[in-house]
Amino acid sequence: MPKTNPSKSWITVLIELVEVFFKSSRQSKQGRTWHQHVVPYENDWAVRREGNKRITSKHRRQDTAIRKAKRLARKYKADVIIHREDGTIRDRINYD
């Protein structure tokens, strides 16, 4: 049975924990964007900020939802991602 060096294993574990911490902190800063998605929602259309579960606004028509999303995207210098009824991406508008 091979002997393991306990101090090395603790150092290795410590290094892995530090790497995970820094990686997660980088992702959380990058993960919050102001990109606006126009998505189908309960037989209507909704605007949803990227990464959010809740919707920002609900609209009967897609063009109305797109106008709302464009206003928000211009304000925050973000993108508008327009989805089709099946959920696939139809178009992307950049306001950077």
Image (cartoon, rainbow, N blue to C red):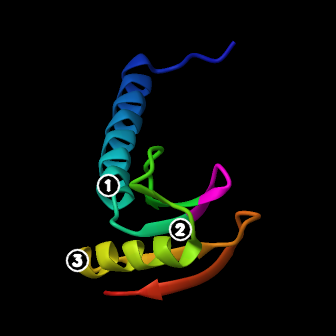
**Quadrant of the snapshot with the C terminus:** bottom left
Relative to residue 66, is residue 13 depicted above or below?
above
Main SS, magenta residues: strand
Q: Position of residue 83 (x, y in %)?
A: 63, 71
- Is 23 one of the magenta-colored residues? no
The numbered mark, 2 or 3, whose residue comes first in the sequence reads 2
**Quadrant of the snapshot with the N terminus:** top right
How much space separates mark 1 and mark 2, taking CA atoms? 27 Å
The numbered mark, 1 or 2, whose residue comes first in the sequence reads 1
As helix, strand or loop, the secondary structure at mark 3 comes to helix
As helix, strand or loop, the secondary structure at mark 2 comes to strand
Relative to residue 47, is residue 55 depicted above or below?
above
How much space separates mark 2 and mark 3, taking CA atoms? 16 Å
As helix, strand or loop, the secondary structure at mark 1 comes to helix
Relative to residue 64, is residue 45 depicted above or below?
above
| Callout 2–callout 3 Cβ contact below 8 Å | no
Dot 3, how many residues are within 10 Å of its Cα: few (below 14), some (14-19), or many (20+)?
few
Q: Please, what is the three-letter code of the amino acid marked with disc 1? A: Arg
User: In the picture provided, is 24 more to the left or to the right than 48?
Assistant: left
Q: Please, what is the three-letter code of the amino acid marked with disc 3? A: Lys
Residue 38's label in the rendered image is: 2
Q: Position of residue 35 (x, y in %)?
A: 40, 69
Identify residue for label 3: 75
Which residue appears at 41% of the width and 37% of the height? 16
Q: Please, what is the three-letter code of the amino acid marked with disc 2? A: Val
Foreground label between 3 and 1: 3
Q: Position of residue 37 (x, y in %)?
A: 50, 66
Identify residue for label 1: 26
- The residues colored magenta run 39-44
